[in-house]
Amino acid sequence: MTLLKISAGPYSFDARLETEAAPKTCAAFEAAMPFLGQLVHVRWSGEGVWIPLGDRDFGVSYENHTSHPAPGQIILYPSGISETEILLAYGGVDFSSKMGQLAGNHFITLTSGHENLMKLGNLILWEGAKDIAFNYA
């Protein structure tokens, strides 16, 4: 099991890569580690924050994909009808874009810090983008 430390805004979370359920997505993400980005609030999907990645290509297709990640689950949308993105659910999410329903690969699950998810989401909603960093634990 590969363990991660995620820093997002003023909060820290422990997490694990879902290497059995999404091996290709995890390998592609690990090749980009340490991964740095900016979280912004979602526009259509509900209670989530995302890292817009434009036309970045991780070279993966769908695996372990969902349109309804649970709070603390992180998904990678590998591109298609919308831009590539990473989304962190902090509450109820119905993963969508202006083009309609999307599905992303669930590849990371938070294992600690859940009590700060809603705080992080609301902070980004009201104050704007925050830095995020993914590192090995």
Image (spheres, rainbow, N blue to C red):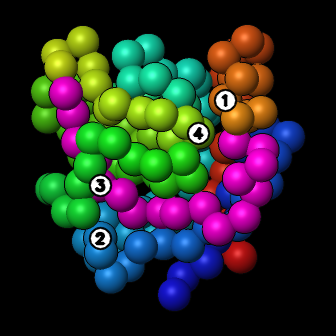
From this view, report whether residue 93 is shown above or below residue 16: above
If you read the primary sequence from the N terminus, does the residue marked by circle 2 or circle 4 appear first?
2
Amino acid tagged 2: Ala
In the image, the segment drawn in magenta is 101-117
If you read the primary sequence from the N terminus, does the residue marked by circle 4 or circle 3 appear first?
4
Residue picked out by circle 3: 105
Q: Do the residues labelled 4 and 1 touch (CB within 8 Å)?
A: yes
Amino acid tagged 3: Asn
Q: Which residue lies furthest to the right in this view?
A: 10
Q: How crowded is mark 2: few (under 14 residues within 10 Å), some or many (20 or more)?
A: some
Residue picked out by circle 4: 90
If you read the primary sequence from the N terminus, does the residue marked by circle 4 or circle 1 appear first?
4
Cα separation between marks 3 and 1: 21 Å
Residue picked out by circle 2: 22
If you read the primary sequence from the N terminus, does the residue marked by circle 2 or circle 3 appear first?
2
From this view, report whether residue 76 is shown above or below residue 3: above
Q: How crowded is mark 1: few (under 14 residues within 10 Å), some or many (20 or more)?
A: many
Which one is in front, 42 or 114?
Answer: 114
